[in-house]
Image: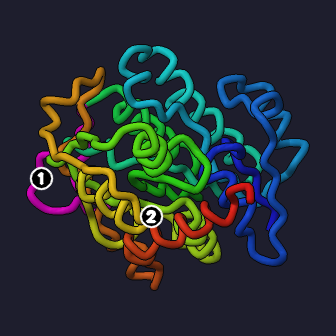
């Protein structure tokens, strides 16, 4: 199985390379060879590599940055995904497209299942939904994988931001009225590999089990890391941002669970991530 990964230097891209099963060949070129906004260049890359599967993990994920520069957000997340889907279809590769809980408006009282109405409320969500629509229209052999609140040991993410902030300040304020599924990139990568082992194409939610607010997540980070920084809950209205995230960003895994694919509880995943993060620190 030969897999081409876009966004290979990102959190999910790194995890896919680290956790590749035996017999899998992973190609994860840097942005100099893998610019999805350049259709001709990307077609040449796919022609050279001849992948069985393309995992399109590359994206503009800076939610506030997308709000400030919607043209760039749509060029990367929508048009770039259209290019990837066209290349996958042209060369007979299956396509895994990493999407987001931000395609939902966050107004539901319950977790969002895979076929709930998509109604994004910010530029990032709209651009990723446009990517979903391109994939469905162009590449029939596709897996659309929505996820949420992704983090790993070393990337730019909430876990590492909280740990850095705790080293600098005795107390922090964290939003308590927005919820989602904290999802460890390593568990997400493992779930993707299990998914592509069977040609059950469609839309899936791959998130660690359970949900948390940003405040609850921060509290658990500090508890597991044995850090005494005080965390104070605040409403989202007091945290001024360019973009408005969905208040309820919790995803329900029903489609993948029907195939026997579930991810561990988020607290267990966080503990494993923190342990690996500590092991990677210089002695």
- The C terminus appears in which quarter of the rendering? bottom right
Label 1 SS: loop
Label 2 SS: helix
Which residue position is annotated with label 1? 108
Residue furthest right in the image: 48
**Observer-nearest residue: 165 or 194?**
165
Instruction: Give left or right: position of 44 versus 202.
Output: right
Residue 151 x/y as whole percent:
50, 53
Disc 2 residue crowd, few under 14, some 14–19, many 20+, Cα 10 Å: some
Report the residue at 71% width, 46% height from top.
Answer: 8
Report the residue at 73% width, 55% height from top.
Answer: 282
Q: Which residues are magenta?
A: 107-121
Residue 1 x/y as whole percent:
80, 68
Quadrant position of residue 2: bottom right
Which residue position is annotated with label 2? 225
Q: Decide if residue 106 is in sight here.
A: no
Instruction: Give left or right: position of 251 versus 26.
Output: left
By secondary structure, the bulk of the magenta-drawn segment is best described as loop
Disc 1 residue crowd, few under 14, some 14–19, many 20+, Cα 10 Å: some
Report the residue at 80% width, 69% height from top.
Answer: 24
Q: Decide if residue 21 is in sight here.
A: yes
Quadrant position of residue 146: bottom left
From the viewer's perspective, is residue 208 above or below residue 239?
Answer: below
Residue 76 x/y as whole percent:
56, 27
In three-dimensional space, the C-alpha distance between marks 1 and 2, rounded to whole angstroms, equals 33 Å
Q: Compare marks 1 and 2 and give the one earlier in the sequence.
A: 1
From the viewer's perspective, is residue 136 above or below residue 184?
Answer: above
Residue 207 x/y as whole percent:
41, 64
Task: Give the foreground label among 1 and 2.
Answer: 2
**Observer-nearest residue: 182 or 101?**
182
């Amino acid at each position: 199985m030969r897999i081409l990964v876009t966004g290979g230097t990102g959190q999910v891209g790194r995890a896919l390379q680290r956790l590749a099963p035996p017999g899998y060949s992973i190609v994860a070129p840097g942005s100099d060879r893998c610019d999805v906004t350049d259709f001709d260049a990307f077609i040449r890359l796919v022609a050279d590599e001849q992948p069985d599967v393309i995992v399109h993990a590359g994206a503009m994920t800076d939610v506030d940055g997308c709000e400030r520069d919607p043209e760039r957000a749509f060029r990367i997340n929508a048009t770039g995904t259209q290019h990837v889907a066209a290349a996958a279809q042209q060369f007979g590769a299956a396509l895994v497209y990493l999407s987001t809980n931000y395609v939902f408006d966050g107004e539901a009282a319950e977790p969002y299942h895979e076929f709930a109405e998509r109604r994004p409320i910010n530029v990032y969500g709209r651009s990723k939904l446009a990517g979903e629509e391109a994939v469905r229209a162009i590449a029939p052999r596709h897996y659309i994988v929505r996820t949420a609140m992704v983090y790993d040991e070393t990337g730019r993410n909430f876990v590492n931001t909280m740990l850095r902030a705790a080293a600098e300040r005795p107390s922090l304020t964290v939003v308590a009225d927005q919820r989602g599924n904290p999802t460890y990139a390593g568990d997400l990568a493992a779930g993707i590999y299990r998914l592509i082992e069977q040609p059950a194409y469609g839309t899936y939610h791959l998130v660690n089990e359970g949900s948390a607010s940003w405040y609850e997540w921060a509290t658990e980070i500090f508890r597991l890391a044995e850090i005494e920084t005080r965390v104070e809950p605040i409403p989202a209205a007091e945290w001024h941002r360019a973009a408005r995230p969905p208040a309820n960003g919790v995803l329900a895994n029903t489609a993948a669970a029907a195939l026997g694919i579930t991810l561990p509880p988020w607290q267990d995943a966080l503990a494993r991530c923190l342990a690996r993060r500590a092991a990677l620190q210089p002695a």
